[in-house]
Image (tube, rainbow, N blue to C red):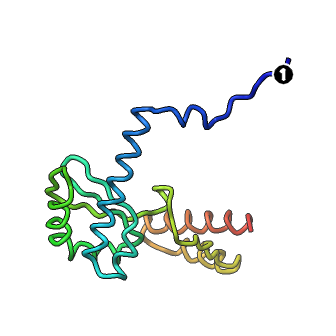
Amino acid sequence: MQKKSISFYAPLSCQNRIINYYYQQIQQQQQILQHIQAVLPVALAKQTRHCLIKDKKLTIYTDSAIWATQLRFYSKIILANIAQQSCEPVDTIQIKIITESTGVSLQVARPAKIPSAATIDIMRNDSLNVSDNQLQQALLKLSSTLQRLSGKR
């Protein structure tokens, strides 16, 4: 007798209050994001990626510090618009930048430029002539790190 395989989609098709709650939260965040994007200029609206309301604070996520600065200029307009749209009261706005540490990044990582072996040797030799002991140690440590990294190329 052959066993019938259980599909993964079967448990997801069942009505689950927890999953429904999270879907509602996602839909609410998407609606709020659309309202925020509606009051912003087109170029700035394209740079607002996500938003979240928690503890009377609206958090908006964007790609870079430049766009974050521009969004701060519109904070009063955004707060006024969100007060009409959201069922939760919002007092403050926090703007965050999406980076590699958050797991999402649209920028391509650039490789480090390691100086040539001759340049590293010059740095090491010149650091021995520095009178400040702390600076001398820092330059020696830098030259040894660069030498180690140049060997990995």
Task: Specify whether 118 is left or right of 94.
Answer: right
Residue beneath the point at 63% across and 68% down:
146
Give percent across and percent down for residue 130.
48, 74
Residue 129's spot in the image, x, y percent? 52, 75
Q: Which residue is mark 1?
A: 2
Is 116 located above or below residue 87 in the figure? below
- Residue located at (44% from left, 37% from top): 19
Quadrant the N terminus occupies: top right
Q: Nearer the viewer, residue 93 or 110?
A: 93
Using the image, determine if residue 2 lies above or below residue 126. Answer: above
Q: Residue 150: image x %, image y %?
A: 70, 69
- Label 1: which secondary element: loop
Q: How many marks?
A: 1
Name the amino acid type tagged 1: Gln
Q: Is residue 29 above or below residue 66?
A: above
Crowding around mark 1 (Cα neighbors within 10 Å: few <14, some 14 to 19, many 20+) is few
Give the residue displayed 37% in from the left and 53% down from the top. Answer: 27
Quarter of the rendering containing residue 23: top left
Q: Residue furthest right?
A: 1
In depth, the one of 68 and 137 nearer the eye is 68
Q: Within the image, what quadrant is residue 121 found in?
A: bottom right
Q: Quadrant of residue 78?
A: bottom left
Query: Which quarter of the image is occupied by the C terminus?
Result: bottom right
Instruction: Measuring from the top left, give residue 93's x and y in whole percent.
Output: 21, 61
| Residue nearest the viewer, comparing 70 with 11 | 11
Q: Residue at x 29, y 60 (%)?
A: 32
